[in-house]
Amino acid sequence: MTTAAINREAIAAQGHSSSSEVLPPLETTAAGGVSLLEVVVESLDSLLANKGRALLTMLGVIIGVASVVSLLALGNGASASITAQVQSVGTNLVFVLPSSPRNHGPSDFRQPQSLTLDDARAIAALNLPVNGIAPQYSSSVQFVAAAADEYGTLVGTSSDYFGVQELSVTTGSLFDDAQTRAAEPVVVLGPTLAKKLFGSGRAVGQTVRVRDQTLRVIGVLASKGGGAFGSTDDQAFAPITFVLQRLFGARTPDGNSYQVANVLMSARKASDISAVQDRVALLLRERHNLKADGSEDDFRIFNQASFLSVLNNITNLLTAFLAAIASISLVVGGIGIMNIMLVSVTERTREIGLRKAVGARAQDILKQFIIEALVISLLGGIFGLALGVLVSTLVTLSGIMTAQVSLGSVLLAIGFSMAVGLFFGIYPARRAARLNPIDALRYE
C-alpha cells in the first residue's frame, strides 16, 4: 500500500511538472509581422534572382514613359517656338481681316473681299493710339532678274509696315510715304530672295521684272527668320498703290476702290488694344452700313494675344492627344507586369505556402508582391525618363526644334507609371495572399 501510494504521488507530481512546461498557444490575432524594410529587401532579392525577366517586364514601362516625356517635351518646345515667332513679328498687334457675314455652306470657297484701301485710309484718319497702319495685298509671283528668276511672295503695303513688323535694312533704304502715294515702282527684297536673284552681287540699284513691270531694288532687309506668317526673308515688299494699280488691278466690284487682304496695326500700349478694336469695328460698321450689334459684320478683328492663345490651344490639344496615344504603351507595360507577376505567383506557390506555414500573414505576402510590381514600374519609369530626356536632347541638338522637358511632364510620366504598376500588381498580389498554405505546400 505504501509503495503504491508513493508511486501515485510521483506520477501526479510528474504530470503537474509537465503541464507547467507546455508553451502557450500562438496568438494569431496579435499585431506584428514582417517589417516593411524586410518586405522591400525580399522583393528586391526576388527581382534580382530573375534579372532578365524583370528587365523585359520593365521594357513596356520604359517605352511608355520615354514616349510620354519626349512627346510632352516636343509639345512644350513647339508652344514656346510659336510664342516666340508670334512675338517676333511685333508687339500689341491688331489684325483686321475680311469675313463673310453669312455662312454659305462647306461648298462655298469664295474668299470674302470686304476690306478696301479706303477703309484703311479711314482707319488712319481716326488718329488712334497706334504706331502705324499697314494695309496689305500679297500674291505669289515670278521675279525675273538679269541672271536668275525665282518665285516668291510680293507684298504690297505701306511704309508703316516696316515699323510695325520691326524690320530694317542691311543695305539701301525702305520706301516712304511719298513713294507710296506716287505708286513708284520700287521694291525691298528679303535677304534670301535677294541672294537667289543676284547671288553675292549687290542687289540695290538692280531691277527685277514682275508681270511685265520693272521694279527698282532700293533695299535689302536684315534677316529675321521664319515667323507665324511666313518668313520675310523670302518675300519682297513694294508700295501697295503700285501693286494694286499696276500689277493686280484688284478693284472692288463697284470700281470705286481697291481690295486689300488685311489691315495690320500696332497699339502703342497693351491697354489701348481693346479701345482700338472697338473703335475700328464701329467705323467699319458705319462705312459698310452694317448693324451696330455686330450680327452682320463682314470683317474680323483680333489681336496678337488672342491669336497666340488659339495657336497654343491647338498645340496643347495635339500634344495631349499624342501623349494619350503614347500612354497606351504604359497600359500595355502594366499588362506585362500583371502577366509576369501571375507567372511568379505560380512558380513560388510552395515558397508562399512555406512562409505561411511558419507564420507569415496574408498581408505580408500581399505587400511583397505589390512592392515587387511597384519596384518594376518605378525602375522602368526612371529608365524611361532617362531615355525620354535623351531623345529630347537629340532633337534639340539636331536643330529641328527645341524640346523642353518640364517638371510637370516628368512627374506625370513617373506618377502614371507607378499607378499602372500598382493597378496591375494588385490582382497577382491578392491571388498570392489568398493561397491556402496546405494546398500551396502540396503544389508540384
Image: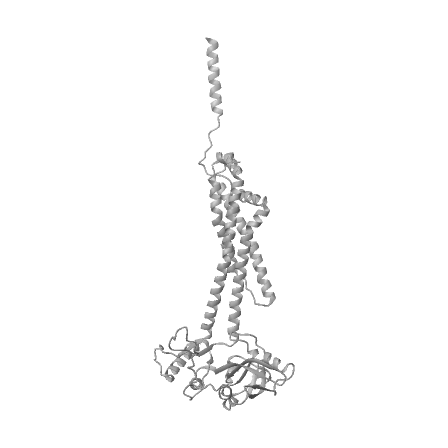
Give the camera-side residue of 442 and 2: 442
**Residue 209 figure quarter:** bottom right
With 286 as the anchor, is 234 left or right in this view? right
Q: Name above or below for residue 146 compared with residue 434.
A: below
Number of disc labels: 0
Residue beneath the point at 51% across and 84% down:
156
Q: In the displayed image of the protein, which residue is found farthest to the right?
A: 200
Query: Residue at (47%, 71%) from the top-left corner?
Result: 308
- Colour mode? one colour
The answer to whether residue 425 of the structure is visible from this angle is: yes
Where is residue 241? Give x, y as percent.
49, 88
> Where residue 47 sits: x, y (%)?
57, 45
Residue 5, above or below 408: above
Residues 124 and 310: in front is 310
Q: Is residue 384 left or right of residue 92?
A: right
Which residue is depicted at the point 54% across and 59% down?
67
Residue 133 visible to the viewer: no
Using the image, determine if residue 420 lies above or below residue 223: above
Name the outermost residue toward the bottom: 182
Pick whichever, 25 or 161, lies toward us: 161
Task: Give the image location of residue 314, x and y in percent.
Answer: 47, 67
Q: Position of residue 85 (x, y in %)?
A: 53, 73
Which residue is outermost to the top? Answer: 1
Quarter of the image where one finds residue 109: bottom left
